[in-house]
Image (cartoon, rainbow, N blue to C red):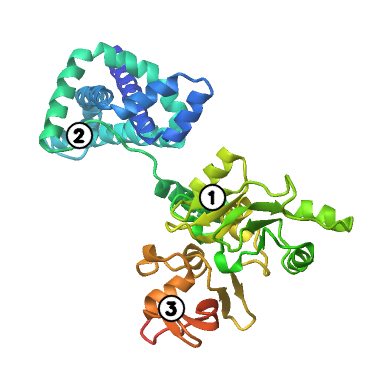
Amino acid sequence: MELDLTGRIISIVLLILASGYFSMAEISLAASPKVKLHQALENGDKRAQQVLDLQVKPGPFFSVIQIGLNAIAILGGIIGETVFSPYFEMFFRLFLSPELSSSLGFFCSFFTITMIFVLFADLIPKRIGLNKPVAISLSLIRSMLFLIWIFKPFVLMLTGMSNAILKIMGLPIKNETTITSEDIIATVGAGTEAGLLDRNEQEAIENVMSLEDRLVTSAMTTRDSVIYFGLNDTFEKIRPLIEKNPHSKYLVCDSTVDRIIGYVDSKDLLCRALENEKFSLKEKGLIKTIAIVPDSLSLSEVLETFKKQGRDFAAVVNEYALTVGVITLSDVMSTVMGSLVQTEENGYIVQRDDGTWLMDGLTPIEEVERTFEIEKMPEEETYETMAGFMMYMLRKIPKLTDKVDFGGYRFEVIDVDMNRIDQILVTKLPKEPDQPD
């Protein structure tokens, strides 16, 4: 009797360990991030590819898991009930009838073995698997592949049946889940909430992810702000322009800004100016070739153009070959870094002492949404800047004092130059009486 009881207890312990193995393998494979698995693969761990392959086609893996877990559950119930029932029955017979003691003994034995299996064969192993999914999935993958090979006939049968049912239901039989930019942004947001990332770092990462969606026109210097030299301009005409508008590069055009010849570097002109040399833009080697990009490119495509051509300065033209602006590598990087590099002098949005904000008409919509925590502007795909937003909402060319109320704020035009909105005053609107705080 003693040996029989010991053997059954050992059997239960072994079943719990086996069930824990299957539970841990199941949850760790499902929870292993593809990014970390790819990193492990790049570091030379070939097991990562085996885990990735099972994630893409998990049918055989889950078939083995279910075979193991269900077989263990049945055996555990059979063995466990006979281990504890006699002792519970003996206890209840001390003060209850034999029939009631037998029923209560069976129930208590069933409850005890169920709790033991739930706790030690399911919950704890799964918690362990969730804590370190990649490490555990890598350590168990080869043993799981061996079990898949051992149970191959059953696996083929179960996989075929489950695939057929999924096809009838119109569901995919392969896991084609990929990581999207929304997933990355959500992960970054969670990291910020957990204190792992700074708000500015979160902003920079989100800006990088948005480069594919933002057009070049959202970051360029617009046509009316472009300083350019005519090919025939003299030293006397160029010098005051440089003193008044210091830039690192200037367009050189033939008569108008729409006929671009190239650009000159301000340091080349500065060297001549310091030596009191008069110069002509027609000097050989002074004018450099400039990249020309269409206004339909995204900022990520502009970066790729800079990389391929080895340049950091480009003119932006529209479908009619008219110049709409210029963009530099610094403009793109300022878009990425956002408030990390912006100062009060070069920022689009400046908060005043009275709690209002002054905003440039060329402020990108993405920056407005982020600053004022506005989820989405109306029909924002039809414009890129706050000037465009004001025109869309007013359905006309805005004039001084025109205003729009949206998202709990009032946007009022306070400076217009030749039909172009220069500045907008932003005021937070008071909450309605029935609005919650």
Which corner quadrant of the image does residue 60 belong to?
top left
Q: Quadrant of the C terminus?
A: bottom left
Q: Amino acid at mark 1?
A: Ile
Q: Residue at x 38, y 25 (%)?
A: 51
- The residue pinned by badge 2 equals 105
Q: Which residue is mark 3?
A: 408
Q: Quadrant of the N terminus?
A: top left
- Of tags 2 and 3, the one toward the viewer is 3
SS at mark 2 in the image: helix
Q: Position of residue 68 (x, y in %)?
A: 25, 22
Residues at marks 2 and 1, CA–CA distance in whole angstroms: 86 Å
Q: Position of residue 313 (x, y in %)?
A: 62, 51
Residue 344 appears anywhere in the view? yes
Q: Residue furthest right?
A: 275
Label 3 crowd (10 A; few <14 / some 14-19 / many >=20) = few
Residue 292 image label: 1
